[in-house]
Amino acid sequence: MAGLGARSVLVTGANRGIGLELVRQLLSKPDSPQWIFACSREPEGERGQALGNLVSKYPNLVMVKLDTTSSASIKAAAACVENHLKGSGLNLLINNAGIYKAVTLDLVDEEDMINTYKTNVIGPLLVNQAFLPLLKRAAQGSSKKGLSCSRAAIINISSIFGSMEWVPLTYNKPAIPYRCSKAALNMLTRCQSVDYQAEGILSTIIHPGWVKTDMAGEEADLTVTESAQGILDVLSKLSDEHNGAFLDWTGSKVSW
């Protein structure tokens, strides 16, 4: 796997599943980032134990409290990260935190939709806004030309369930709030890819595959190890041509 070359990486939803495995693999790389910020809603709680164990072993790993549904929490997290970076920018932001609710079209209600959108769409929007100054600083301070994860990038973890073309093939799991929220996240990423390109910031959507997590269950195809390894390999190869692209964990394009 090629190296990312990023000095600093931040991962939301890092206390379990894909997020936790991304952190583990980043730590194990020969060129591990100087700083890895692992964000969790309850870092000191029971679900943060695995992350806490890693923090005790790796001095370059910082556990950050970040609730993507709270603007105050997001702002506090950005201040914490800025303090650690001491004038340097943030190279790579991975928006991994998300929720899934398997609700059908006839049963979905207002609360289901609002709660899912708050976490899966508004959360990444606010996180990206809060960390944008640090991403800009990284892009401006880099000697690298063009767009890449080693310069400055926002990676939004989406899903094939957000693809309109794939609906007929995946509708055995309706999951209406999740589908709609991921389609909205895809649009958000496309908008950011246009808006942030001039600042030297790459914006890309990644479908991690159908992964054996608490969200997907054991019937899924991929292990978290396989998914995270694929994602990091793809991230290491991203460039200008992938700005605003919708890719899966193998680097293949996903139809919209």
Image (cartoon, rainbow, N blue to C red):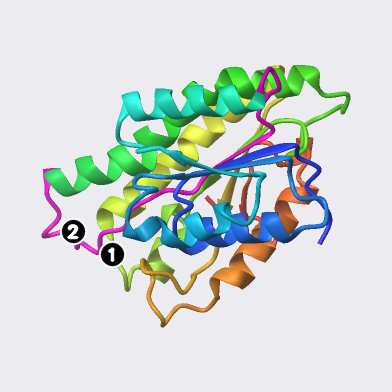
Rendering coords of residue 96 (x, y %): 49, 49
Residue in the foreground of this view, choosing between 113 and 231: 231
Rendering coords of residue 60 (x, y %): 67, 44
Disc 2 to disc 1: CB gap under 8 Å: yes
Describe residue 210's horizontal placement relative to residue 65 as left or right. Answer: right
Rendering coords of residue 220 (x, y %): 45, 78
Give the quadrant of the N terminus.
bottom right
- Whether residue 195 appears in this view of the structure is no
Q: Is residue 104 magenta?
A: yes
> Which picture quadrant has residue 119?
top left
> From mark 2 to mark 1, how far is it between C-alphas?
7 Å
Q: Which residue is mark 1?
A: 174
The majority secondary structure of the magenta stretch comes to: loop
Residue in the foreground of this view, choosing between 227 and 103: 227
Rendering coords of residue 51 (x, y %): 49, 56
Q: Could you say whether the residue bearing mark 2 is in a helix, strand or loop?
A: loop
Q: Residue furthest bottom?
A: 219
Q: Which residue is mark 2?
A: 105
Where does the magenta region start and end?
Answer: 86-110
Residue 72 numbered mark, or none = none
